[in-house]
Image: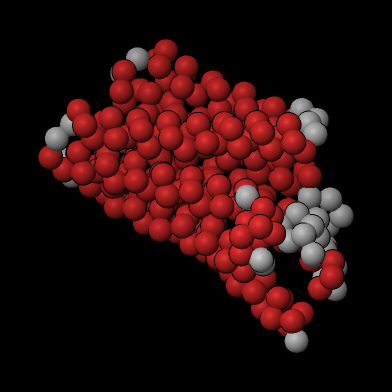
Amino acid sequence: MMQTIDMAIREVHIGLWFLVVGYYFFLFIFLLFFRWRNTRNPFQFAMALFFLLLALGRAFYFVGDFYADATSLYGDLPDLGVTVFLPDAAPWLAVGAFLQWMALATLSATAGFMIFGKRWAEIGFAVPAILIGVILAAVPLDYWTRTALAGGAGFFYALFIPGLFWYLAYVSGGLLRRSNFMLGLGFMVLFAGRVVHSGRHYLADMIFGSYTIPGVLAPGLIVIALILIAVGNEWSTKG
């Protein structure tokens, strides 16, 4: 009976992450073909590229988490009698991490240019995320080093990116202020969802007792974040 319930929960988790990937692609298509094509606003193009990279990265994570390594997402998945399709999740997770950090580099560069209006700021804000993405994807690291690097850098950007947009909200006014505030809030919720997903094993073992709640909470937060970001982005076109 428990195996049936656990498998049903796993299918719910798969569906939620599939929804996240689909939403990423939807926002990419909407921003590129229905916003940037009409306005030629570089911010709209950067946001479209950001969501495209997130979608591609999450698609690789999706395969690695659910269909490659039986222990990559659920520590006890082999006990459910699940046979994975692919033998090794590492390449999928490495490419996924690289693409997601490239998305973050794109977002950082955009925010830097919006604040300073200079090419050096755009490059300077992007370089750290690019380096982290390359290291996580290509450099052999032990588990704790990789976790510390990804977690520490992720925590920094979880504060840094929303802070940039809230600074822009502070120095702007009217609808643009609300837009930047909403974007900052959306990105904070987005990073919160990513933190929950990264810490799913700890949360399952030490707090919730199973993967059910972390598995629903992480994609749920990301979907909420995408709605907030979409609203903020829409307001930016009218500000």
Q: Is residue 99 visible?
A: yes
Tell which of 24 and 42 is nearer to you.
Answer: 24
Quadrant location of the C terminus in the rendered image: top left
In the image, residue 165 sits, relative to residue 130, either above or below, namely: below
| The image quarter in which residue 71 lies | bottom right
Q: Position of residue 214 (x, y in %)?
A: 58, 61
| The image quarter in which residue 212 lies | bottom right
Q: Position of residue 219 (x, y in %)?
A: 53, 59
Q: Answer left or right for 152 relative to 44.
A: right
In the image, residue 198 sits, relative to residue 215, either above or below, namely: above
In the image, residue 231 sits, relative to residue 121, either above or below, namely: below
Tell me the residue at 37%/48% (across/down).
186
Tell which of 11 and 37 is nearer to you.
Answer: 11
Q: Residue furthest bottom?
A: 1
Tell which of 25 and 211 is nearer to you.
Answer: 211
Q: Is residue 68 visible?
A: no
Tell which of 28 and 98 is nearer to you.
Answer: 98
Q: Position of residue 144 (x, y in %)?
A: 74, 36
Q: Answer left or right for 8 relative to 185.
A: right
What's the image's color scheme? secondary structure
Q: Position of residue 77 (x, y in %)?
A: 79, 66
Q: Residue furthest left?
A: 174
Tell me the residue at 38%/23% (across/down).
112
Tell how many labels: 0
Tell me the residue at 69%/27% (across/down).
135
| The image quarter in which residue 180 lies | top left
Tell me the residue at 72%/40% (across/down).
94
Quadrant location of the N terminus in the rendered image: bottom right
In the image, residue 112 sits, relative to residue 94, either above or below, namely: above
